[in-house]
Amino acid sequence: MLLLKKLETMLICIILIIVGILIFLYTKNKIENFSESKIKINYLSAKEAAKVFLNSEKFPQIKKFRLNEIYARTTYYGSSSNINNMRNIAKKIYTKNTINFTEVDKFKINNNLNSLNKRIIDFNNKNNTNIPVMKTWNLIKISSDMDWGFPYTIDNYIVISDNFITNTTTKQMLSTLFHEQFHIYQRKYPIIFKKLYSQWNFKYIKNFKLPSKIDDYIITNPDAPNNDYIFKLNKSNYLLPILILDKNNNDNHLSKCIYLKKNKNSFEIKSSKLINLKDIPNYYTRFYKINQNYHPNEIFANLMSKIVFQKLKLNNNDHKLIKKFFDINLQIFNKV
């Protein structure tokens, strides 16, 4: 009888140990990749940032810049109409506009990124999701005279302006940095995003040539530098979303599209008339009426920010799709 009681006690102890180990492993799996202590922030000096902009491998987008957008991005109106000369001039302008982070900048950003980390942990725990946060953040500071003062990414760096750091609210900074991290993921893992976008009826195409009257005013968004996704409307009709400059105001960016038709295994322009994306209900409403809807990279990053910071509710299919997307790819994203 005494032996039996000892065995029961040992069994209970073993069960409790196993349960304790399982709880530990579950908790560790939930938080280890979002631990505040594991966030590393690299603030590039002005000299280090200038080298990034001069590096064609890290900043290949500049090879796509058109004359009109170089003028608009840099506010430099030179006499040269040679696109290669202007791209080289633009590179030099970028290097002259990189700025060192101040200690005040670093204090503000450190607090906000740690706050973002905690916020995503809480969001994941409440919603049973696995939305990632980058472990390493590489930041470049640039003059707000460049690129309309907009944040963007090149290579694995997030570029932010002096005005952005100084004038944005905490919520705006959190939402924007959270948004920008997805562009790092998209650049690093294009194949898995390509699969996701196909389920949104986007089809990847390469090297589609636009008429010069449109191409001359294209804006090369570094986070979505190619017009490489078309959206399927029906069996034979597609639209190509694009972002262009307003010819009358370089500070205006217009989300437009042109209609394409499928011809066997290729696509051709059905009409070169530019249509506002807002005027196409089964596209505009499909993606929750967001403004940056000219490329699936931007659609995805915007949706994620709105889900977390504006409590956007996705339809049931999109909710399941994105949840599954993060569940499957969590380990991949946690390498960044």
Image (spheres, rainbow, N blue to C red):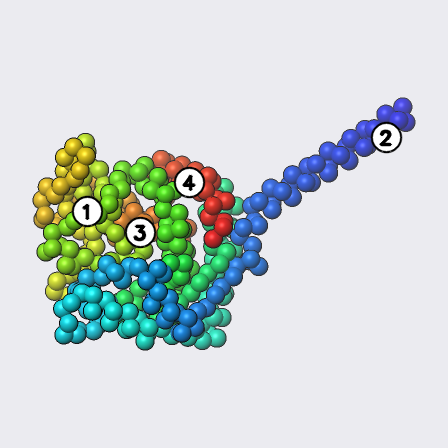
Along the line of sight, the residue nearer the viewer: 27 or 99 = 99
The three-letter amino acid code for the residue at tag 4 is Phe
Q: CA distance from mark 4 to mark 1?
A: 28 Å
The residue at which mark 2 appears reads as: 6
The three-letter amino acid code for the residue at tag 3 is Glu
Circle 3 crowding by C-alpha within 10 Å: few under 14, some 14–19, many from 20? many
The residue at which mark 3 appears reads as: 298
Disc nearer the start of the sequence (3/4) = 3
Q: Secondary structure at mark 4?
A: helix
The residue at which mark 1 appears reads as: 208
The answer to whether the residues at label 3 and label 2 have Cβ atoms under 8 Å apart is no
Q: CA distance from mark 3 to mark 1?
A: 19 Å
Along the line of sight, the residue nearer the viewer: 161 or 289 = 161
The three-letter amino acid code for the residue at tag 2 is Lys
The answer to whether the residues at label 1 and label 2 have Cβ atoms under 8 Å apart is no
Disc nearer the start of the sequence (3/2) = 2
Select label 3 or label 2 by which is in front: 3
Q: Is residue 323 above or below residue 219?
A: above
The residue at which mark 4 appears reads as: 325
The three-letter amino acid code for the residue at tag 1 is Phe
Q: Is residue 167 visible?
A: no
